[in-house]
Amino acid sequence: MHWQTHTVFNQPLPLNNSNLFLSDCALREAVAREGAGWDIDLLASIGQQLGTAESLELGRLANANPPELLRFDPSGERVDDVRFHPAWHLLMQGLCANRVHNLAWKEAARDGSFVARAARFVLHAQVEAGTLCPITMTFAATPLLLTHLPAAFADWRAPLQSDRYDTHLAPGGQKRGLLIGMGMTEKQGGSDVLSNTTRAEKQSDGTYRLLGHKWFFSVPQSDAHLVLAQAKGGLSCFFLPRFLPDGQRNAVRLERLKDKLGNRSNASSEVEFFDATGWLIGEEGEGVRQILKMGGLTRFDCALGSHGLMRRALSVALYHAHQRQAFGKNLVDQPLMRQVLSRMALQLEGQTAFLFRLARAWDRSTAAEEALWARLFTPAAKFALCKAGIPFVAEAMEVLGGIGYCEDNELPRLYREMPVNSIWEGSGNIMCLDVLRVLAKQPGVQELLSMMCSEVKGQDRHFDRAWRQLQQRLRKPLETEGREITRQIYLLGCGAQMLKQASPPVAQAWCRMMLDTRGGSLISPQVQEDVLIRATGGAG
């Protein structure tokens, strides 16, 4: 008997075994333009390895098998450990081997090291985002610790700067590589860290005893955490190692792991401190100032991570649209679908140009103007770009239709992952308030904006109009307009880079799409062709 009911056809193959770097023309150009051309060959190698089916499967496995809290060992001893799927460890090994946690510090004397590191971060984000959390925190904490590392932990300097990933449960000085986590927020406060109730009392030997809790204690398996607690002199920053110098476990109890919407591969925990031992970083009362030294770095990584997820979503959608036929044509050749895909590709063109200009500002932040550029545009990027990622991935799902909504596809994981970058390290309103703070307190910031916009004045009427509108708002910035001010600053930053770096038709198309308040602007066939070719690795 013949039981076959149908033949399977017109079903696109999944996107794997592609080179994540060479297939992204905008990224290649930005890396070379912003000073990291010396890293292009290695980035191409990393992009090839990360784009394999095997690497993508590791990302799936790490999220399908989330970490498990182990409070006790088989003999009943308290261990407060976390067990991960082997895929997590393989991904972490790759991140450390590719020096995403330390490249900018170990190659600080080399122009473009921050840019090269940003490119590696974006590539890894396209495979698996949860593993980037410990990498980001370690990256941000390293310069602070190298300056303020307590004397009792002098033997941490070498493993802190190592390219090795070491999972052994042992004191930091005995390991080949270290991870650093952070613990800032508490149940009653969230972003309002000044309301923290965890207390720190100074001991006769100069250490502190901490009693309290943390509502979000990121990456609890880290070798040490930087935490905020109330000392006699005010809110202060403390170094809490997992193991004390005598080899004993610190009194940090893991209460539970968070059951999160996304970011499933990564462990986020709740903890309590039962007279945990900590070492003061800096001076008492300087906690917020010390944390802000790291905050800009972690916030920039949030924007980079969202951009990487968006890039992967577009790649999946484009690959599908080039294979899938509907109503007699490939999807990519259907006029309305071509508009949708072109707009997505054009949006990423602007993001790429802007983010890597921002990476160059971080790279050269010893110069006052570049430091100010980074200080203003980092919170603006985190606010606007991270929020834009959520509908962007949803649009990519629609390109695939029903199969894009099913867990067999990678897009649902990308969609669940998106909101964390908008929330972590300060949600949207916090970023906008930070931008307003920069505008009010940083000398020269409005002059910086004026200089940036004057460099491209007259090239596009939509850009010029948006700049005039922002100038009106900046005469008397209102907190209630903080979101619109922040969004406009971000868009002008992107637009200025597009007008300087992209071809005039592409730059003007971006300005019409992103800055024309009337909406509804269409992308011409020639620009469609250009941006879609570039989005798949061609020169356009």
Image (tube, rainbow, N blue to C red):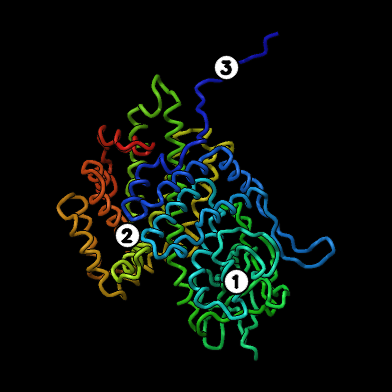
Label 3 residue SS: loop
Give above or below for 206 relative to 304.
Answer: below
What is the C-alpha distance between the residues marked 2 and 3? 52 Å
* Residue occupying the point 43% across, 30% down: 321
Q: Nearer the viewer, residue 368 or 495?
A: 368
Question: Hey, which residue is sitting farthest bottom in the picture?
Answer: 204
Question: Hey, which residue is sitting farthest top in the picture?
Answer: 1
Identified by mark 3, the residue type is Thr
Looking at the image, residue 336 sits to the left or right of residue 119; the answer is left
Mark 1 — residue?
Answer: 156
Quarter-of-image position of residue 344:
top left
Q: Which of marks 2 and 1 is in front?
A: 1
| Number of the label disc, if any, that sits on residue 484 | 2
Instruction: For the C terminus, give its image quadrant.
Output: top left
x, y percentage for residue 235? Answer: 52, 81
Q: Can residue 39 be seen in this view?
A: yes
Looking at the image, residue 523 sits to the left or right of residue 308; the answer is left
What is the C-alpha distance between the residues marked 1 and 3? 61 Å
What is the C-alpha distance between the residues marked 2 and 1? 45 Å
Instruction: For the N terminus, give its image quadrant.
Output: top right
Looking at the image, residue 61 sits to the left or right of residue 428; the answer is right
Earlier in the chain: of badge 2 and badge 1, it is 1
Identified by mark 1, the residue type is Trp
Earlier in the chain: of badge 1 and badge 3, it is 3
Quarter-of-image position of residue 164:
bottom right
Q: How crowded is mark 1: few (under 14 residues within 10 Å), some or many (20 or more)?
A: many
Identified by mark 2, the residue type is Glu
Label 1 residue SS: helix
| Number of the label disc, if any, that sits on residue 7 | 3
